[in-house]
Amino acid sequence: MKQSKSECKIPTRCKINMNFVACATAAGSQHANFAYLHRKNAQSACALPLVRLCEAMQKKPSTPTTAAGASLTYADAGVDIDAGNAMVEAIRPLVRATRRPGADSEIGGFGGLFDLKAAGFQDPILVAANDGVGTKVKIAAATGQHNTIGIDLVAMCVNDIIVQGAEPLFFLDYFATAGLRPEMGAAIVASIAEGCRQAHCALIGGETAEMPGVYRAGDYDLAGFCVGAVERGHLLPRADIAAGDVIIGLASSGVHSNGFSLVRHIVEQSGLDYAAPAPFAAPQGGAVSLGAALLEPTRIYVRSVLAAIHATGAIKGLAHITGGGFPDNIPRVVPTSLAARVNLAAITLPEVFSWLARAGNLSQGEMLRTFNCGVGMIVITAPSQAEKVMDELRAHGETAFRLGALEPRATGDSVRYDGTLALA
């Protein structure tokens, strides 16, 4: 596990081999990185270690007052080792509560460990993915709402992993900022942990980098790295994808984590403040601010899709609809001899997309190549299996619907459309 970096190059990150990384920077603030955090019940037994953690993070060393010629200490340089150790002890019960099969190490080592055999794999192929959340972090920074952005980070990686038919196993994060603020760092890492919990994926470590010469005050960036596994012979897409196969759409939760440079440009041109009420019905329901509505986290499809794969044995292929929309992502899993025929009228378009199209005067073509337009994942299956697959997906909480079908392609576009999006 790498060390955290600070301007003075002091080694600042305590190492773990499970789900925690403590960072005591040269500025004296602390950052804790942990997986699964606590159960959604905020009154759980895990809440106390979290409180202790936050208290430890807010303890800052006093300004150095060492007399001239006296022996210096690490604390005099702004790094309080004792505070870092106190954090480790405070969260130890929380770390133990995050274990999953294959990841049950105690904190204290130099690297994250994962035991494939303990996770139940016999002859696995590893699948790796990494991603970020783009300029969605700018909205989080502008609004001060950092408690969901880590879910996006996990989602962008684990949703790619399951497209190969693989189960996400463990996750690592990279958090870079101009200067650490304890409350912001805690919220970000807590949301990463929540994303890992949703994906049943262990957060086994990460890195925090403090780079004041690279980032402006208040700015930060995130990157995630995920490794999953699938038994040999069960990789997706399958070789038997054929003309006539049905394309099933799984509804998205909103914009997810792509196209935010355009989203931010539209917001700027509209003259709206992120604190203003959202000018569209938000996914959360009720009256929320524009910023909160746009920060609705990316949906994580791991549990539902893996359940459908295992229960039906009928899923031939999957595509995560991210940047590039349908035209760039569906062809990645479909043979070049086939084209996808997509019925746009079958999509129940979230109102955020209608608002973006109106406020930005965006064409349907631009919408389709920039955003997910209400479909975060597509599933390919044989016509005879479509209802069974959709029933299984719905049983696990997904909004699943027939989106289209595959057809022979000699020339022409690999994705073709019927109907139109309800943008008005």
Image: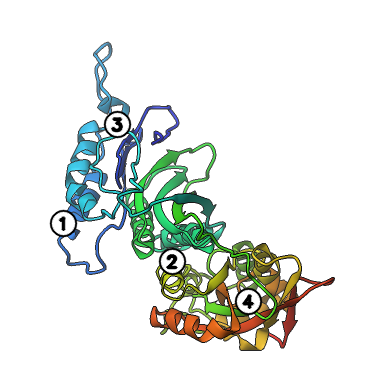
| Residue 239 location, quadrant | bottom right
User: Is residue 149 or residue 219 the one in the foreground?
Assistant: 149
Q: Distance of mark 4 from mark 1, alpha carbons?
A: 42 Å
Q: Position of residue 369 (x, y in %)?
A: 70, 69
Of marks 2 and 3, the one in the foreground:
2
User: Is residue 174 or residue 236 the one in the foreground?
Assistant: 236
Q: Position of residue 35 (x, y in %)?
A: 31, 53
Q: Position of residue 335 (x, y in %)?
A: 70, 65
Dot 3: element: loop
Residue linked to disc 3: 79
User: Is residue 416 or residue 154 the one in the foreground?
Assistant: 416
Q: Which sits earlier in the primary sequence, circle 4 or circle 2? A: 2
Of marks 2 and 1, the one in the foreground:
2
Q: Which sits earlier in the primary sequence, circle 2 or circle 1? A: 1
Disc 4 + disc 1, Cβ < 8 Å = no
Q: Is residue 226 above or below residue 421?
A: above
Q: Tell me which amino acid carries mark 2.
A: Val
Dot 1: element: helix
Residue linked to disc 2: 302
| Residue 383 location, quadrant | bottom right
- Residue shown at 43%/80% (left/top)? 392
Q: Which sits earlier in the primary sequence, circle 1 or circle 3? A: 1
Residue linked to disc 1: 48
Dot 2: element: helix
Q: Distance of mark 1 from mark 3, alpha carbons?
A: 25 Å
Residue linked to disc 4: 356
Q: Distance of mark 2 from mark 3, alpha carbons?
A: 40 Å
- Badge 2 crowding class, 10 Å Cα cut-off, few under 14, some 14 to 19, many 20 or more, is many
- Residue shown at 65%/88% (left/top)? 345
- Quick check: 18 left or right of 210? left
